Image: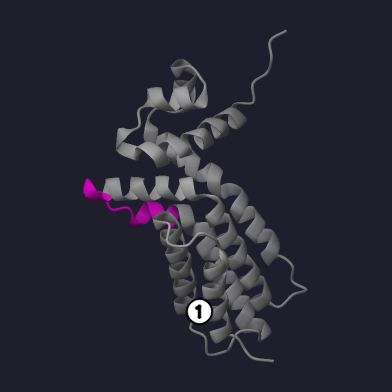
């Protein structure tokens, strides 16, 4: 009897293995043959899942981020805790996860810079892949103002933009190798959240 193949699992595995290749070789230099070799599959198998390397990278982005958003949503769901506490927990979770995914960040930054050099506007693509995180920041800031743990004068849109900017700063510093762990990133998030919090 033939062994059943879990196609979604196989596709995810290929994408995760390709992440390191994109990180080390650079998006422009990667070929689908290299992806197949790195993933340990035949090219014919690879073509069942991906038509080009851009699809491989998109799948790598999803594979590297899907669990992170779920973990953040779980932290944010505990309504017994003030929103400011949950916001700090979510930001710490994001910082920790990004530091664990250096290869992934290098691969994404390289891809974005490659596309920008070729004249492509990457803003829409970045917004699409970060929509869940932005929405979560908006929700927690709104809940923080509502439950009184964040100052009532907080400009919600500006606060969310600053939190996302801190996330981008964190990702940039990891990619550049400026910081070797998440301590400074967690401190930056916490310092900003403390600035907009209501002191007990």
Residue 110 falls left or right of residue 8: left
Give residue 42's position: percent from left, percent from top.
48, 16
Above or below — where is 15 with respect to 127?
A: above
Q: Quadrant of residue 31?
A: top left
Check disc 1 and report the residue beneath it: 156
- Magenta residues, start to end: 116-128
* Element under disc 1: helix
Give residue 51's position: percent from left, percent from top.
40, 27
At label 1, counting other C-alpha atoms closer than 10 Å, the crowd grade (few under 14, some 14-19, many 20 or more) is some
Q: Quadrant of the C terminus?
A: bottom right
Task: Please name the predominant secondary structure of the magenta segment in the image.
Answer: helix
Q: Quadrant of the N terminus?
A: top right
The residue lying at 42 percent from left, 55 percent from top is: 175
Give residue 153's position: percent from left, percent from top.
53, 90
- Check residue 72 for magenta coloring: no
Residue 29 in view (yes/no) = yes
Which residue is the extreme one toward the top?
1
Residue 119 in view (yes/no) = no
Name the residue nearer the viewer: 116 or 30: 30
Which residue is the extreme one toward the right?
80
Name the residue nearer the viewer: 108 or 180: 180
Give residue 18's position: percent from left, percent from top.
47, 34
- Check residue 125 for magenta coloring: yes
């Amino acid at each position: 009897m033939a062994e059943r193949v879990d196609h979604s699992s196989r596709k995810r595995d290929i994408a995760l293995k390709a992440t390191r290749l994109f990180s080390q070789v650079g998006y422009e230099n990667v070929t689908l043959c290299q992806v197949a070799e790195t993933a340990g599959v035949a090219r014919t198998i690879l073509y069942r899942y991906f038509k080009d390397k851009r699809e491989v990278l998109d799948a790598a982005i999803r594979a590297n981020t899907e669990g992170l958003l779920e973990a953040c949503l779980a932290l944010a769901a505990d309504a017994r805790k003030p929103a400011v506490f949950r916001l700090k927990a979510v930001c710490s979770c994001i910082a920790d996860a990004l530091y664990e995914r250096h290869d992934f960040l290098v691969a994404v930054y390289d891809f974005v810079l490659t596309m920008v050099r070729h004249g492509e506007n990457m803003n829409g693509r970045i917004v699409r892949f970060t929509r869940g995180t932005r929405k979560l920041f908006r929700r927690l800031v709104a809940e923080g103002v509502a439950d009184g743990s964040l100052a009532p004068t907080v400009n919600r849109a500006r606060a969310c933009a600053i939190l996302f900017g801190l996330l981008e700063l964190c990702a940039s510093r990891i990619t550049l190798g400026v910081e070797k762990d998440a301590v400074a990133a967690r401190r930056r998030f916490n310092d900003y959240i403390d600035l907009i919090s209501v002191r007990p």
